[in-house]
Image (tube, helix red, strand yellow):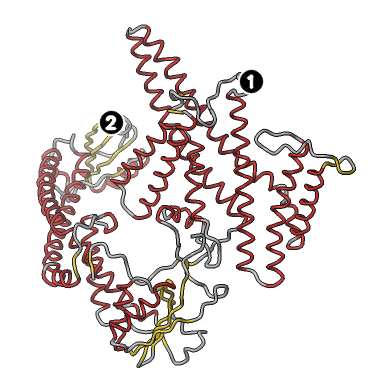
Amino acid sequence: MLAPKPMGRMLIVASRDQAAPIINELYREHMFHIEDYVEQGQGGYEGFKIGTPLEGATEASAELIKVRAIENVFAIRGEDADAKQKLSTPEIQKKIEQDLPGIEKEIEGLTGARSKLDTKAKEYEQKIVELAPFKEIPLDLALLQGFKHFSVLAGYVPREVTISVPHEMQVVKGKERSFVLVVVTENDRARAERELQEAQFQSVSIPAETGTATARTAYYTEQIASLKKEIEAINVKLAKIKESHADLLVACEEAFRARIEQTEAPLRFATTSKVFVAEGWVPADRIAALSAALDKVTGGRVFVSEQPVDPVHDNVPVEYNNPDFAKPAQLLMDVYSRPTYTEVDPTLVLSIMFPIFFGVIVGDVGYGLLMLVLCIGLWKFMKGDEVHQFLKILRNASIMSIIFGLLFSEFLGFELPWAPIIYSRHLNIGVTEAGGHGAAIAQLLIVSVWVGILYVTLGRALGMINHARQDHGDHRIKAVLASLGWITVMWGILIAIWSMFPIPLMPDLTGLPIVAVGLSVGMVLAIVFIVMGVIFIARDAVLEIIEIPTIISHVLSYTRLTAVGLSSVAIAMVVNYMSIGMFINPGMKSLSIVGIVMIIVGVLIFLLGHAFNLALGMLDGGLHSIRLHYVEFFTKFYKGGGRKYIPFGMKRKFTED
């Protein structure tokens, strides 16, 4: 569980006439991660070249393009669709041959007709825009064009304009500019245009229409309405086709995609005119089963060999090996980086501790229930594996928030009927006596420091394991001892602090006997630990010594588990005081109009305030919880950079082989 799934390297050799059944079986088994063959620089493959696609690749690609075009028309996405019934390969092949061409033809005709109607409607809309300036001119537009000896100028001017040549002008005044229609002789056109330009004239084309602008606008509006009815009728037909054939379309897309991946697989193999060679990775516990399956489909005409694996030098693909409850946390691991094959996989730790950290920060039954309801609601409306993995993380975090809310006795900032089971986070300012809320908060801070101490220690211990696995020779010893040195320095500092100051919930070493030079046994042990740790660290990398102060900062960083949670409690209590204490309660005393308004305002403050605090709680709880893992924990031992295991094939959703 703390390591990736063991992998084995597999070599497959067969004659080229066996390529199709072998590829089909590899695709069906969905466990063979293909190592792409590269012609240059690969020893042992002299005379080999990259293979060519199998028969049918071009046709499948063309059909896939057509199907995806239809899906785009209907806005269908396979990942968002639900599989009502899986179609077998013979069934889908029959439907592809019999039904799909007819569907494609019908949709092509309807979409083509809709496109023409839509284009026509846009043309009419543009004509209405062109007619708009002339709507106040009660003239037949045909009278404004076609003259030999006269010119008609139309456009907008921001101010009054004076034209010195003989002319006729009609003005339609507007708020910021006026529309003018000017008629001049052809001989005076140039001078009139010049004078208009001096008045910042913006020319408008005269529509080539017959009749008044108002009448033509009404005509085009009527035509647009008629076109939209036709478009709507086509949309209804398309909607019926979508409802009837959506399942078939996504199944066809999946089938064509599978066929393309299979027919193009030889492009990843090494081939000659007679044979092909495929190399790849398979989970170690599945090699025997895959070998038997290939032997069966070829009638024994295939050579399968398990190759030796060098975990250090081979770039082994990584597949997580976690229990089901931990698998959602793999999403958070991939956001950071997938572990390498020889590295400790911290997914299990993250899957357990992230929800706990989140729950400690939020720690409220009300907020936890709201997040859980939100999670359930989003699950129904949002599709996709990654989205569902994220929602599972949120679900776990919500449940932990409810649990810690019960322990803290918190519900939307109010105390529950029972006293806090562990510590109280309610901010009763002024309470300082032992056992009061101030003391409880101080103890909660110390508990969070303990979490930091143990987490940093665990991180360095895992670092020792990683160095022992990944490093070699003298450097391995130095690196392992350096990680041990960080542990001894940290615990040396802690022992020194405990020897000088009594701290609640921590060992009290102030009473240990003095050994020499005024130093107690605890101080001597602390000095030994610190000196030994510094030596171990310096032997591996001297410059790392300057990072020693980060030990304290990383440990104290875990106090954010308490501090951020207290800020959420404070906001909740302020919202309750403002809404109930300042508005609702005073309004209830006098149910006048003012009182009712105060109650409504108080309710709004309550709802909006807690909604805002819920959003902050989700953001803070998530960011700070993951930050404590990414920054304070992973940096002690984890590098990442592993290559994802991508087996050849697909998890079929709509079809089955």
Q: Quadrant of residue 464?
A: bottom right
How many marks are shown on the rendered structure? 2
Q: Nearer the viewer, residue 238 or 46?
A: 46
Q: Residues within 10 Å of mark 1 (few under 14, many from 20)?
A: few
Does residue 211 show up? Answer: no
Where does the image place residue 108, in percent across and percent down from the top left?
15, 63
Looking at the image, residue 567 sits to the left or right of residue 325; the answer is: right
Where does the image place residue 440, in percent across and percent down from the top left?
59, 28
> Which SS class for mark 1?
loop
Type of amino acid under label 2? Gly
Q: Nearer the viewer, residue 418 or 257?
A: 418
Q: Nearer the viewer, residue 291 or 43?
A: 291
Q: Marks 2 and 1: which is nearer the front?
A: 1
**What residue is at 42 percent from the left and 57 percent from the top?**
323
**In this rendering, is residue 68 above or below 288?**
above
**What residue is at 77 percent from the left and 39 percent from the top?**
499
Type of amino acid under label 1? Glu
Looking at the image, residue 474 sits to the left or right of residue 585; the answer is: right
> Which SS class for mark 2?
loop
Where does the image place residue 571, in percent across and percent down from the top left?
50, 27
**What residue is at 26 percent from the left and 77 percent from the top?**
58
Disc 2 from disc 1: Cα separation = 78 Å
Looking at the image, residue 449 sits to the left or right of residue 120; the answer is: right
Where does the image place residue 550, in percent across and percent down from the top left?
69, 48
Considering only order in the chain, which callout, 1 or 2, is on the residue closer to the N terminus?
2
Can you tell which mark lies on residue 354? none
Can you tell which mark lies on residue 174? 2
Q: Residues within 10 Å of mark 2 (few under 14, many from 20)?
A: few
Q: Quadrant of residue 502?
A: top right
Furthest residue to the right?
517
Can you tell which mark lies on residue 433? 1
Furthest residue to the front?
513
